[in-house]
Image (cartoon, grey):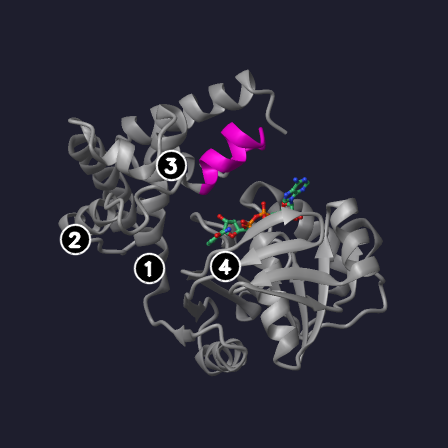
Amino acid sequence: MKITIAGAGAMGSRFGLMLHKAGQEVFLVDGWKEHVEAINRDGLKANFNDKDIVEKIPAVLQCDIPTDFKTDLIILFTKALQLDDMMQALKPIIHDRTDVLCLLNGIGHEEIIEKYVGLDHIFIGNTMWTAGLEGPGKAKLFGTGSVELENLGEGQSAKAKEIANVLTEAGLNASYSDNIRYSIYRKACVNGTLNGLCTILDCNITGFGTCKYAHEIVTSIVSEFAAVAKHENVSLDVDEVIHHIEETYDPETIGLHYPSMYQDLIKNHRLTEIDFINGAVAKKGEKYGISTPYCKFLTELIHCKEEILKAK
Ligand code: NAD
């Protein structure tokens, strides 16, 4: 299968590398010049489960995509705020039969993708894989993960299962879901609490989790997500989600980890995905007449921090 990875950062590198190793025809598209140059010059390097490997995968800058290029599947792995520009850049290679799989964190990306691709060709999902970038052309990939995905268009479940099979054959452990919006909202609750709160409070997950007010704040945020999700016929079990979040506080598991938003904003002064997590809930809440003060406030605080740090 001809697969284009659109957004070849940490996660795009993981998926591109594993699919390429499995024999798929992979093509990387990215907006970071030094990264694309390094991949084309030296191959995509990775520390892959403690082993240094190199995969020779063609990469191209998103402003230089060849117009005669055909692809069967596009897997989107930009940051949420880069998605619209990437879809715009991909326009020349999107044809009637091009399928698009979106695995970004956050809510509502389909509203952007639908501007460029018919519903029958859009697949959404989420992933428990993780990845990091050590610098241009070099990824750090360890641990295990999974992918869940579903078709947006009616009657396209066979295609969704076919895509899941391709990912699974590459070791990406993918499965078809018949309730992907539930999984997306559930994961967004984790990101919508730990990401923004650890970033603003300048602490790791255990640091936040051991605060006296942690339970109350998490309950308020998750309840806002659940109220908005309910309006979209997604039924979150608030207690189960809170328990799921609180399990991450354990320093023996991932508690000592600083969430990706912290790394992006505090360490690297990069803009965040907050508008697609808490910001999306606040916006939907306004539209549905649901009060979401915690999500709105956290979104505003993160934007203030972005301004203070002159994030780009
Ligand atoms: P990323 O920041 O590694 O890459 C996203 C884009 O930013 C890529 O185009 C990349 O080339 C570019 N970029 C990265 N570092 C840059 C730099 N220093 N200068 C210029 N450009 C740079 O993002 P990611 O972690 O791969 O995340 C992609 C999506 O997947 C997001 O929605 C994220 O929330 C989600 N996600 C990430 C992980 C993870 O462990 N990284 C896990 C699950 C989901």
Q: Are marks 2 and 1 in contact (CB under 8 Å)?
A: no
Earlier along the polypeptide chain: callout 4 or callout 3?
A: 4
Q: Which residue is nearer to you in this view: 73 or 266? A: 266
In the picture, the disc for residue 270 is none
- Few, some or many residues within 10 Å of mark 1 (<14, 14–19, 20+): some
Instruction: Name the residue that disc number 4 marks.
Output: 103
Q: Quadrant of the C terminus?
A: top right
Give the side of residue 94 with respect to residue 105, left or right.
right
- Few, some or many residues within 10 Å of mark 3 (<14, 14–19, 20+): many
Tell me where the magenta segment starts and ends, as one range. Answer: 260-272
In the image, is residue 134 part of the stretch drawn in magenta?
no
Measured Cα–Cα span from mark 3 to mark 2: 19 Å
Three-letter amino acid code at disc 2?
A: Glu
Give the side of residue 80 with respect to residue 74, left or right.
left
- Few, some or many residues within 10 Å of mark 4 (<14, 14–19, 20+): many
Earlier along the polypeptide chain: callout 3 or callout 1?
A: 1
Earlier along the polypeptide chain: callout 3 or callout 2?
A: 2
Secondary structure under badge 4? loop
Instruction: Name the residue that disc number 2 marks.
Output: 240
Mark 4 C-beta closer than 8 Å to ligand 1: yes
Residue 103, percent from left and from top: 50, 59
Q: Are marks 3 and 1 in contact (CB under 8 Å)?
A: no
Earlier along the polypeptide chain: callout 4 or callout 1?
A: 4
Residue 1, percent from left and from top: 66, 80
Instruction: Name the residue that disc number 3 marks.
Output: 278
Report the residue at 56% width, 20% height from top.
309
Secondary structure under badge 2? helix
